């Protein structure tokens, strides 16, 4: 498919990189492109900025394991997937300073697009309600644009982005010029509530769990900085009650939880073959065993697919093969404890550097990705990497003016 998601993401990435390398030079006959005059200066400063530089580590982990990976084709595929970690940090570092209002425009566009996509998915669900609900009861999911888990993660971030926009408008007493239209606040409320409710209709457990954990973390942050313990406690109680309300009122949510309970019963009874959750749990076991066989350096990112295939063939022949549904286990199996250490360090360093966890949206994108790591190998495909790096680097650029 010519205009696939990966194709569009590649075009956007090339465009951002080109902006960091070239600039227009006006001439009598028009204009031409030339290398940026400050390119060397930007690169020199980039090498000194550890917050941006350290984000490149996931690419170099794959590059390092290519030395002892036998499957050259799969190794090159892994390098291609991870190349945004090498190029985008410098590209975003080279951008002009990103003001708060500019970041809010990006977040608004994100929330708006999420609402449009959610409406389309919802209409399609209503058109074929009975068939899709029956599909959910058998472990399926509501059809979404692309992978339903990645879609739910994007919706989870959009919910918190909408709440952030509303909070900033609510807190605009000393900056009233932020409010451009009188209907802004009702619009933000409507879009945020719609996306929150729709996520329960969509009933992707990974996305919902990530959403609730992220909201809980933000509430802890709010209580810590505001010292409003009673309000925070009531909000926590409300957060715990909401899933119960959803279970009683949303059919797809209730159906999904019912299937999950049945699925886990089958797994613990030793009858988990071809059940969704059982396959996920088996993938974790297989990934850990592959990692344990090469504890320090792993089997190599390029040989991981074949190692997992061999493990299933030997120990789980009756279960559908899946790559590990956990990013940390995937890193461990492919690059060992050494790679896992560097990967974990590269993930948390930008968060704690200069107390950037104080910023709610920067904490949110990292929390959503971290929690998703526990249930998915989020950054092993182009969409997951693009989502993570886009908002990580945008918000980091906003927090690191030059």
Image (cartoon, helix red, strand yellow):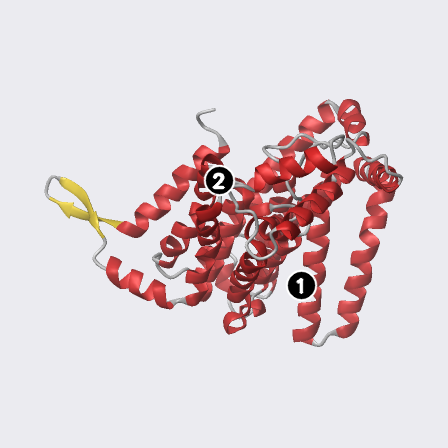
Residue position for label 2 = 70
Residue at image point 67% right, 69% down: 222
Residue 110: x and y in percent read: 54, 46
Q: Residues within 10 Å of mark 1 (few under 14, many from 20)?
A: some
Pair 2/1: label in front: 2
Residue 116: x and y in percent read: 59, 37
Residue pushed farthest left? 28
Residue position for label 1 = 218
Residue at image point 75% right, 44% down: 281
- SS at mark 2? loop
Residue 303: x and y in percent read: 54, 41
Residue closer to the observer: 135 or 130: 135
Rendered view: 127 above or below 85: above
Residue closer to the observer: 43 or 94: 43
Horizontal placement of 175 versus 214: left or right? left
Horizontal placement of 227 versus 23: left or right? right
């Amino acid at each position: 498919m010519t205009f696939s998601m990966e194709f569009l993401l590649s075009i956007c990435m090339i465009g951002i990189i080109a902006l960091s390398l070239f600039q227009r030079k006006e001439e009598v006959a028009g204009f031409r492109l030339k290398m940026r005059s400050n390119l060397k200066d930007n690169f020199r400063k980039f090498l000194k900025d550890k917050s941006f530089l350290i984000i490149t580590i996931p690419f170099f982990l794959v590059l390092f394991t290519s030395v002892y990976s036998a499957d050259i084709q799969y190794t090159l595929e892994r390098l291609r997937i991870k190349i945004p970690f090498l190029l985008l940090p410098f590209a975003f570092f080279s951008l002009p300073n990103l003001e708060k209002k500019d970041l809010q425009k990006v977040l608004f566009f994100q929330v708006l697009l999420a609402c449009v996509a959610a409406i389309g998915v919802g209409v399609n669900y209503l058109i074929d309600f009975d068939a899709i609900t029956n599909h959910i009861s058998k472990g399926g999911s509501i059809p979404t644009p692309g992978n339903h888990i990645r879609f739910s993660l994007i919706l989870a971030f959009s919910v918190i982005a909408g709440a952030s926009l509303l909070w900033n408008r609510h807190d605009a007493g000393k900056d009233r010029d932020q409010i451009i239209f009188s209907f802004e606040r009702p619009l933000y409320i409507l879009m945020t509530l719609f996306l929150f409710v729709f996520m329960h209709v969509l009933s992707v457990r990974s996305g919902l769990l990530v959403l609730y954990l992220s909201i809980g973390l933000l509430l802890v942050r709010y209580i810590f900085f505001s010292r409003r313990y009673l309000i925070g406690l009531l909000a926590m109680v409300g957060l715990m009650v909401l899933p119960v309300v959803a279970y009683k009122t949303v059919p797809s949510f209730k159906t999904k939880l019912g299937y999950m309970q049945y699925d886990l019963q089958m797994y613990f009874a030793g009858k988990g073959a071809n059940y969704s959750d059982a396959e996920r749990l088996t993938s974790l076991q297989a990934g850990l065993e592959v990692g344990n066989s090469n504890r320090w350096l792993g089997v190599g990112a390029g040989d991981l697919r074949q190692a997992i295939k061999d493990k299933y063939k030997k120990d789980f022949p009756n279960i559908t093969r899946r790559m590990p549904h956990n990013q940390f286990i995937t890193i461990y199996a492919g690059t060992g404890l050494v790679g896992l250490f560097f990967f974990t360090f590269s993930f948390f360093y930008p968060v704690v550097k200069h107390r950037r966890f104080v910023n709610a949206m920067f904490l949110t994108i990292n929390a959503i990705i971290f929690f998703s790591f526990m249930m998915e190998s989020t950054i092993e495909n182009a969409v997951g990497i693009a989502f993570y790096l886009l908002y990580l680097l945008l918000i980091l650029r906003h927090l690191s003016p030059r």
